[in-house]
Image: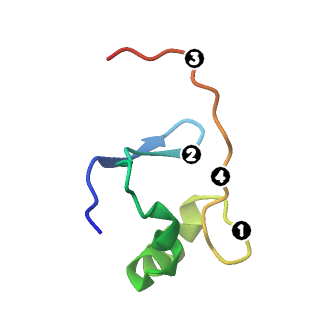
Amino acid sequence: MEKSDYSIYFERDSGRLFAFQKLADDHTAGELPQLAILKKWWNYMADLMETNPDRSPACQELEEMFHLD
């Protein structure tokens, strides 16, 4: 499972985190929550982000307002 082009941004004024990941057509991102290293990351970051009961990040859909290739 190859991963590339993943970024997490921190907005200091609001304390919000924003994650961006490009997915290949054959991505397996749905399997990521099962990885021990990801669960370790969630626990490590839990004090900095809103989480679900399983400590996974609370996500909110964003509407794309502009895109340029």
Dot 3 amino acid type: Met
Q: Nearer the viewer, mark 1 or mark 3?
A: 3
x and y percentages locating residue 16 in the rendered image:
57, 44
x and y percentages locating residue 28 in the rendered image:
42, 64
Q: Indicate the quadrant where residue 35 lies.
A: bottom left
The residue that label 1 is drawn on is 52
Cα distance between the residues tagged 2 and 1: 17 Å
Residue 65 is labelled as: 3
Q: Nearer the viewer, mark 2 or mark 4?
A: 4
x and y percentages locating residue 49 in the rendered image:
59, 58
Whether tag 1 and tag 3 are in contact, CB under 8 A, the answer is: no
Dot 1 amino acid type: Asn
Mark earlier in primary sequence (2, 3): 2
Dot 4 amino acid type: Cys
Question: In percent of the image, x 52 and y 73: which residue is there?
Answer: 33
Asked if residue 41 lies left or right of residue 54, the reply is left
- SS state under label 2: loop
Cα distance between the residues tagged 1 and 4: 9 Å
Dot 2 amino acid type: Gly
The residue that label 2 is drawn on is 15
Residue count near mark 1 (Cα–Cα under 10 Å), binned few <14, some 14–19, many ≥20: few
Whether tag 4 and tag 3 are in contact, CB under 8 A, the answer is: no
x and y percentages locating residue 60 in the rendered image:
68, 45
Residue 59 is labelled as: 4
Mark earlier in primary sequence (2, 1): 2
- SS state under label 3: loop
Q: Nearer the viewer, mark 2 or mark 3?
A: 3
Q: Is residue 18 above or below residue 68?
A: below
Mark earlier in primary sequence (2, 4): 2
